[in-house]
Amino acid sequence: MGQCLEKVPSERRLMSHNNHPNQQSTSTKHVKKKAKQDATEQQSNHLRHSYRQMNPTTTILEPRRDLPLHKIPELLAKITGTLSSTLSSSSSDTKQQTSSSNGITNSLDRRFQLFRHYSDNDEELMPLDGILHFCKDLSFEPDCYEVLLFCFLCRAKQMYSLTKDEFIRGLKTLGNHVDNLLDVRTSLLNYDILPYENEFYTWTYHYGLIDGQRCVTTANAISLWRLYYSKGIERPVILNQWLNYLEQDVNNEIPKTITCDTWTIFPQFAKFIQLNGYEAYDDNEAWPCLFDGFVEYQLDQQKPKITLN
């Protein structure tokens, strides 16, 4: 019996001893888990601190913990309104760009249609008949200043014909809005040619060359001089005297053609005579020979006529 009593406490002590390792293991796991969480949080704080030092201008967004629940719908409404406004503005800009692009395309289509109408459906060339029809619909005479101006704006290379590219270029030069007859007429009547005066003058001579000619015929040159100085550009004082001299050909000395040199120097010659008079002209200088005969004729005209009774 005594042995049994002694044995019971001994077994209890043994059982108590066997349960203690499990309690110690659970406690150890809790300590390790807590230490691991602390280490993770410490490492996260360290990384955040390091990132802020590397990017001082960068703002780290932290979750708001002070926002009441009833304020959340209001905040969401503001965010949604801002996004809607941004999307609406972007959509409006896109529509404007699309509208502008469509307007340019439509204008170009109308110009092509206008060309095809006067080119008798030829895709590349407007012939003389088409040009005459075009002038008639514009209420312009074919040999008027406005038609010469339009051909210059087209940079036409030949008389009596216009290519598709030349025609479209002329309309574009008049203005992006020009794609109908009324706008063409109005723009030509109000076009300021003075900034392009010299280029216009040089082009006019080359435009007068026909069928590969190297020089413009005197008759064509006279017509082109009259057209060029008929509007918008200051007329030389001696222009009428010069053209009359060429047309009358009193001494049968006028050549059948006008050289490019004579055409190019004429404005300078006219200004010299206007400032200095015919008497100051020196035929030993490098003036074209045609000017020598003209000055001689004008000086002879100024001499008093002696009448015999």
Image (tube, rainbow, N blue to C red):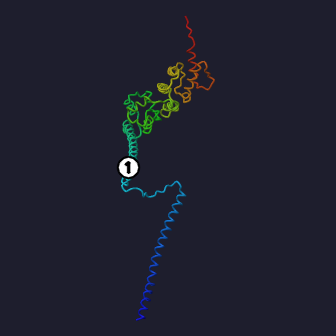
Relative image position of residue 41 (x, y in whole percent): 49, 65
Position of residue 288 relative to residue 86, above or below, is above
Determine whether 60 is above or below 161 in the image.
below
Q: At label 1, which amino acid type do we have? A: Gly
Does residue 295 appear anywhere in the picture?
yes
The residue identified by callout 1 is 81
Q: Can see residue 205?
A: no
Q: Between residue 174 and residue 37, name the one nearer to us.
A: 37
Residue lying furthest right in this view? 284
Number of callouts: 1
Residue 53 lies in what quarter of the image? bottom right
Residue closest to the eye, 187 or 303: 187
Position of the C terminus, as image quadrant, is: top right
Q: Residues within 10 Å of mark 1 (few under 14, many from 20)?
A: few
The residue at 41%/40% (across/down) is 124
26 above or below 81?
below
Residue closer to the observer: 163 or 16: 16
Q: Residue at x 55, y 26 (%)?
A: 267
Q: Quadrant of the N terminus?
A: bottom left
Q: Quadrant of residue 286?
A: top right
Q: Quadrant of residue 132?
A: top left
Residue 307, image x and y in percent? 55, 7
> Considering the numbered disc 1 on the image, is that residue within a helix, a strand or a loop?
helix
Rendered location of residue 264, percent (x, y): 55, 29
Seen as rendered, the residue at the extreme front is 2
